[in-house]
Amino acid sequence: MGSPLERMADFDLTEEQRAVRAAVREFAEKEILPHVEEHERAARYPSELVRKLVPLGYMAPMIPEEYGGSYVDAMSYGLICEELARVDWVVASVVSVTNSLAAKSILGFGSPAQKERWLPPMARGECLASACLTETGGGTDLGNMQTVAKRCDGGWRLTGTKVFISHADHAGIFFVVASVDRSRKHKGVTAFLVDPKTTEGITIGEFPMRTLQRDNLAEVHFEDAFVPDEALLGEPGGGFPILGGALDMGRFSVAMRCVGQAQRCLDLAVPYAMEREAFGQKIGEFQMIQLKIAEMVSRLERARAVCYRLGRMLDAGVGRASLESSLAKLTASEAATQNALDAVQIHGGYGLSAEYEVGRLVLEAKALEFGEGTSELHRKLIAEFALGVRKQ
Ligand SMILES: Cc1cc2nc3c(=O)[nH]c(=O)nc-3n(C[C@H](O)[C@H](O)[C@H](O)COP(=O)(O)OP(=O)(O)OC[C@H]3O[C@@H](n4cnc5c(N)ncnc54)[C@H](O)[C@@H]3O)c2cc1C
């Protein structure tokens, strides 16, 4: 065990979990990190980096071995997400969307045929997943979904537009939610597993962002797109419980990604503070810079503590962990954003220069405050739990 900070991060992990963290970190620093800036500048999706995850078992840590995955405990899965996100938002996002949202939902609610069809290619890295949830009218109020699924002979016809869709151009499966009856609000929301390559009536358009150029976010239009009965996941109107279960694990994986980003900001700020000089001394010797470093460590470790506890709860087999996943997602995403801002401040103007990574991390960390529920939504959920008006 190395420094006191490493000791704290590793303290109650098992030997296997420590080994997972060390192996992923070594791989990520060697194989992924050197390419990230170049990919961002060229707006190039990191397909070849994603392929490298497969033989190491990092692509499918939530998919059981019988389907070709490398199934590990939730805590180890979280550590994989943390360490991948420490170097690259997008590669970590591929793993978390494919495992937490798509694979977890299929494992929990899919038919044997759906599991056989989708999980093995996902485990082989041949079928990345996109989650098509958010719409132009809003992503928070999913019960008010505009995209509709109309019953037809042999299946369903989907019509509507989804926005902010990560990995859409590269995905082999779309996890789509649409309403079968808008008057029933969230009770009409239904989940579908859609093959974007063979389904007619799907078009993928650009959705330009100020950040994450290498993720190529997209908007996805469904125009009377026919999907067969086999595409229905669970029951008509049963989409919200599926989303709920998936989002517990999804929020855990996003929260762990935030821990990775918060850690990266600290890792970049500390050596800079000990190297850069002003007024004849290291800037790290100024108390105001030390204050920022102390706050960064404190935020990071608070986030890590809440997230690791959630990982252990998921491993203990709790049915639902909505309160804890909201707490983890809220704490960790805000820690990542604040750590990124502090890291930039410590770098001075260079923090926003193309030469340094920290400037890029500000918007990338901020983006994690939106996916899988905004900070406002999580505060609302936490308060409702505390007030007793929400039970799960
Ligand atoms: C980089 C990135 C990647 C993404 N990838 C995906 C993806 O792959 N798939 C996908 O489906 N979506 C994706 N999203 C979308 C994301 O999930 C949404 O941005 C998020 O759900 C919020 O929806 P919205 O942006 O429409 O905001 P809105 O829902 O319009 O909310 C706007 C503001 O109002 C607040 N608000 C809303 N309701 C309440 C309330 N009841 N109380 C208090 N405040 C409230 C929100 O917190 C927010 O601050 C991605 C977003 C980003 C930034």
Image: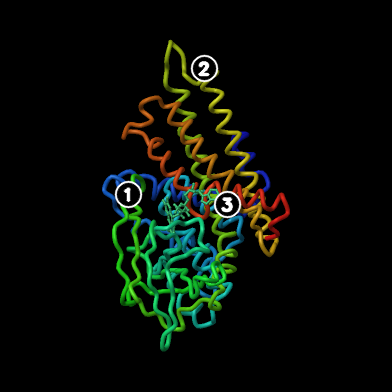
Q: Earlier in the sequence, mark 3 or mark 2?
A: 3
Residue type highlighted by circle 3: Ala
Kind of element beneath mark 1: helix
Alpha carbons under labels 1 and 3: distance apart: 33 Å
Q: Earlier in the sequence, mark 1 or mark 3?
A: 3
Residue 232, x across and y down, in percent = 48, 78
Question: From the viewer's perspective, is the residue at label 1 or at label 3 nearer?
Answer: 1
Closer-to-camera residue (225/321): 225
Residue 338, x across and y down, in percent = 51, 35
Q: In this view, does 75 lie to the left or right of 347?
A: right
Question: From the viewer's perspective, is the residue at label 2 or at label 1 nearer?
Answer: 1
In contact (CB < 8 Å): disc 1 and disc 3: no
Q: How is the image coloured?
A: rainbow
Q: Earlier in the sequence, mark 2 or mark 1?
A: 1
> Mark 2 — residue?
286
Q: Tell me: residue 248, above or below residue 5.
A: below
Closer-to-camera residue (71/325): 325
Q: Place residue 121 in its image quadrant.
A: bottom left
Residue type highlighted by circle 1: Gln
Tell me the residue at 68%/65% (across/down). Answer: 319
How crowded is the residue under tag 2: few (<14 C-alpha within 10 Å), some, or many (20+)?
few
Q: What is the number of the mark on residue 213?
A: 1
> Mark 3 — residue?
19
Q: What is the number of the mark on residue 345?
A: none
Question: From the viewer's perspective, is the residue at label 3 or at label 2 nearer?
Answer: 2
Residue 116, x across and y down, in percent = 49, 79
Residue type highlighted by circle 2: Phe
Alpha carbons under labels 2 and 1: distance apart: 36 Å
